[in-house]
Image (spheres, rainbow, N blue to C red):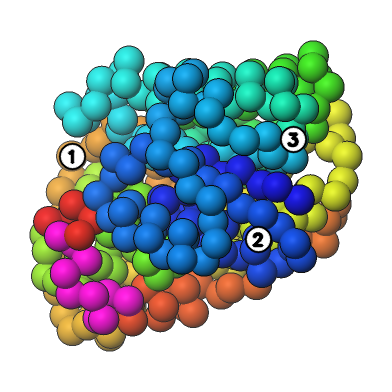
Amino acid sequence: MKILITGICGFVGSQLARSLAERIEGAQIYGVDNLLRPGSETNRTALIANGVKFFHGDLRMRSDIEALPACDWVIDAAANPSVLAGVDGKSSARQLTEHNLNGTINILEYCREKKAGLILLSSSRVYSVAHLASLPVLERNRAFVLNASEPLPAGVSACGVEESFPVQQPISLYGATKLCSEIMAVEYGSAFDFPVWVNRCGVLAGAGQFGVADQGIFSYWLHAHARRARLRFIGFGGSGFQVRDAFHPSDLAAMIAAQFVRQPPADPVYNLGGGPQNSMSLAQLTNWCNDRFGTWTPEPDVRPRQFDIPWMVMDYRRAASDFGWTPEHRLESILDNIAAHAEQHPDWAELCGAA
């Protein structure tokens, strides 16, 4: 099996390449990346040493994609991952759209021409910010939990947010590019008869992840705490009670390997994440870091920030029912591995552009 991974020199892409090579006998891994992110070059060197056939290219350029060899499957792991992209002054809305939507369209054209299947990595950020922000929550053990005494909207329970949860706008420019990519991917697959799976991922985390905020809050928080960088509890009273769940890319790889050998159903969209058992608030994460690295106190910043939400946990019960999938890596072990990496690489912030 020939597998092409876009964004292969990012954290998720590089981790998937290693994990799928171990899981699938005879797999040939190809990868393309524009190497724009600081730290990507380090992953490129390691991937080539492990037998990955690497191509330097930009998905926004059709000519770069035309130079890629034919493969059986494409895993689209290339995107600007920041929910604030396009409005944070670091990138424009046009740049975001070109990266996250136009790039996907070019990959879909590749799949049409090569009759390759597509695994699209989407995001929990396709879900409605307004609906998530209005969830009834209360504080328990320095973390928000759903208030079971109040009625919950359809598509959410103590198990998390389901695939049926509203995707009504606004969802951020980033979320909109991912939702549009989902729609176009399913339409292309249907119109041109190639398999498409859409995996809406929660926070992916693990050792070696770039320690910047848009790459995932868990890795960013640990690396920043370890080097005594400025940390803030933003919004929600400056308490740090907001909650997210996390899972490891190797668990994502297990799902992808199973999808390779199945025919997608009419609705190929699956939520993947750590679930309630792998969730934690920023305040709880800070306590964990204090025990590991010594005390470092974040600053409270009560001002609300656009697109922030109090509670987001992915309900992966559909994946569990259809594939028997559950995340094997526990959050504690993921944090331990990130912390060990931070201790072993004190220059990581400079390498990945976080400093």
Name the residue rendered at 79%, 32% in the picture: 195
Is the residue marked by circle 2 packed among few (<14), some (14-19), or many (20+) residues within 10 Å? many
Compared with residue 39, is residue 189 higher up or lower down, i.e. above or below?
above
Mark 1 residue type: Arg
Question: Residue 346 is drawn in which quadrant?
Answer: bottom left
Q: Residues within 10 Å of mark 1 (few under 14, many from 20)?
A: few
Instruction: Say which residue label 1 marks.
Output: 303
Q: Is residue 280 above or below residue 33?
A: below
On-image quarter of the C terminus:
bottom left
Q: Residue at x 18, y 84 (%)?
A: 294
In-image side of 350 versus 3 (left or right): left
Q: Disc 2 marks which residue?
A: 20
Q: Quadrant of residue 139?
A: bottom left
At mark 3, the secondary structure is strand
Tell me which residue sits at (86%, 35%) in the image: 265
Residue carrying label 3 = 117
